[in-house]
Image (cartoon, rainbow, N blue to C red):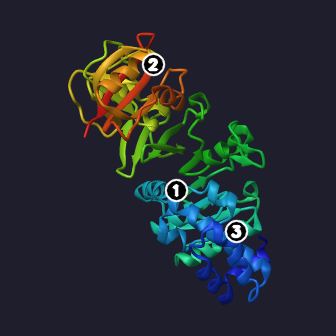
């Protein structure tokens, strides 16, 4: 889709076409396209159908109502921040006194829209003319155009002085897929860091797998998860304690801050097992979690915390264990059948066995056995082990 076709999509005719294609199943697209091309230009029909597909995919990030009000490009949707995550970051900026911000590499505008919803005036910058047109249309669609100025430019050439804060989300994808080297971001992380250092307040969105040694010493690193899945890491400049780390779990918003604790002790497996949220693990805060639940590690290299008593925590999923056994598929299969277990959830950490491979070997029949069980494939004090249990309510 080029800018001219996108402009037609915003016309009254284009809007009517978008309404007609909403909810079209992939199997019906060809028939629908054939019918619509009798009334509309083929390029416009193709663009509307593509937009319908993107909006359906966007529901997971933006919710159904907002997804079908916004416009997307394939790359823009892939890069866009999930709405609750962007809202969390924007809320923090507002709480820190930000009233104006520059959003560099704004994409389709998800972060700029979140900032504007907090009443923050935003200059959103991207180098793609089509992407900028989409970002403008999205600001109009959500009635935030008065707060969002979209500028098509090279972000490295845009003056950011005069704004309270800077947000940057360098592109981490190329035509060949994801980019893992921070210096291969577009623009490179080193440029974004230097730009952030010059701002009164700055937040840089980076991949959650960024090595801790790549975090500048004057920045605080925040790992953010949503519904248990780690979504991003953010490097904050000028907002928090330099060198600090924290994990934030959405949608509740619980935050665990690092205190530089030593590694937890290793001890015998107790009655309960706690599986830390991914953000806690990425932030290297398992020690802080273990202290909170009065727990210990089951192995020096495994991020599973065990306790003798139940300690509810938002930072980990808890399980009550029934068995701790050396790894043995045959013994596990016999035990599960003896207990009438037909459904297993397999989790692994520190094991070479793949969950699907284990399920095939267990040959359980959920139709004849109603029981369920969680099986952890891991190591206990260095030995391959199986832990069986059930989630805590």
Residue 68 x, y percent position in the rendering: 54, 72
Of callouts 1 and 3, the N-terminal one? 1
Residue labelled with disc 2: 329
Instruction: Please report the residue visible at 67 percent of the width from the left and 57 percent of the height from the top.
Output: 105
Of callouts 2 and 3, the N-terminal one? 3
Between marks 2 and 1 in the image, the one whose residue lies nearer the viewer = 2
Residue 365 x, y percent position in the rendering: 40, 36
Alpha carbon of mark 1 to alpha carbon of mark 3: how far?
19 Å
Furthest residue toward left: 309
Alpha carbon of mark 2 to alpha carbon of mark 1: how far?
40 Å
- Judge whether 208 appears above or below 309 on screen: below
Residue labelled with disc 3: 132
Q: Secondary structure at mark 2?
A: helix
Instruction: Please report the residue visible at 60 percent of the width from the left and 62 percent of the height from the top.
Output: 162
Quarter of the figure with the N terminus: bottom right
Furthest residue toward front: 368
Horizontally, residue 12 falls left or right of residue 239, namely right
């Amino acid at each position: 889709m080029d800018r001219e076709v996108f402009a037609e999509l915003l016309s009254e005719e284009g809007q009517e076409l978008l309404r007609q294609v909403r909810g079209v199943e992939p199997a019906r697209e060809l028939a629908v396209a054939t019918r619509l091309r009798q009334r509309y230009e083929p390029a416009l029909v193709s663009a509307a159908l593509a937009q319908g597909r993107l909006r359906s995919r966007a529901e997971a990030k933006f919710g159904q109502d907002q997804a079908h009000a916004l416009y997307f490009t394939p790359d823009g949707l892939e890069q866009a921040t999930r709405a609750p995550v962007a809202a969390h970051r924007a809320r923090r900026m507002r709480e820190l006194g930000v009233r104006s911000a520059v959003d560099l590499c704004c994409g389709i505008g998800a972060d700029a829209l979140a900032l504007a919803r907090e009443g923050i005036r935003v200059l959103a910058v991207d180098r793609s003319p089509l992407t900028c047109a989409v970002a403008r249309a999205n600001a109009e669609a959500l009635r935030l155009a008065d707060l969002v100025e979209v500028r098509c430019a090279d972000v490295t050439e845009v003056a950011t002085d005069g704004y309270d804060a800077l947000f940057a989300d360098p592109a981490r994808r190329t035509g060949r897929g994801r980019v893992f080297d921070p210096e291969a971001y577009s623009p490179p992380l080193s440029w974004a860091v230097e730009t952030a250092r010059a701002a009164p307040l700055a937040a840089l969105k980076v991949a959650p797998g960024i090595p801790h040694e790549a975090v500048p010493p004057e920045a605080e690193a925040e790992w953010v998860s949503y519904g248990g899945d780690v979504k991003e890491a953010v490097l904050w400049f000028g907002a928090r304690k330099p060198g600090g780390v924290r994990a934030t779990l959405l949608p509740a918003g619980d935050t665990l801050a690092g205190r530089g604790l030593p590694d937890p002790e290793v001890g015998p497996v107790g009655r309960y097992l706690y599986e830390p949220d991914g953000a806690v693990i990425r932030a290297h805060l398992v020690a802080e979690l273990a202290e909170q639940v009065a727990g210990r590690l089951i192995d020096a290299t495994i991020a599973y915390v065990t306790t003798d008593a139940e300690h509810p925590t938002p930072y980990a999923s808890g399980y009550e264990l029934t068995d701790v056994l050396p790894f043995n598929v045959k013994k596990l299969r016999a035990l599960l059948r003896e207990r009438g277990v037909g459904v297993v959830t397999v989790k692994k950490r520190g094991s070479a066995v793949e969950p699907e491979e284990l399920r095939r070997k267990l040959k359980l029949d959920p139709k004849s056995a109603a029981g369920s069980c969680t099986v952890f494939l891991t190591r206990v004090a260095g030995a391959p082990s199986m832990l069986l249990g059930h989630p805590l309510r």
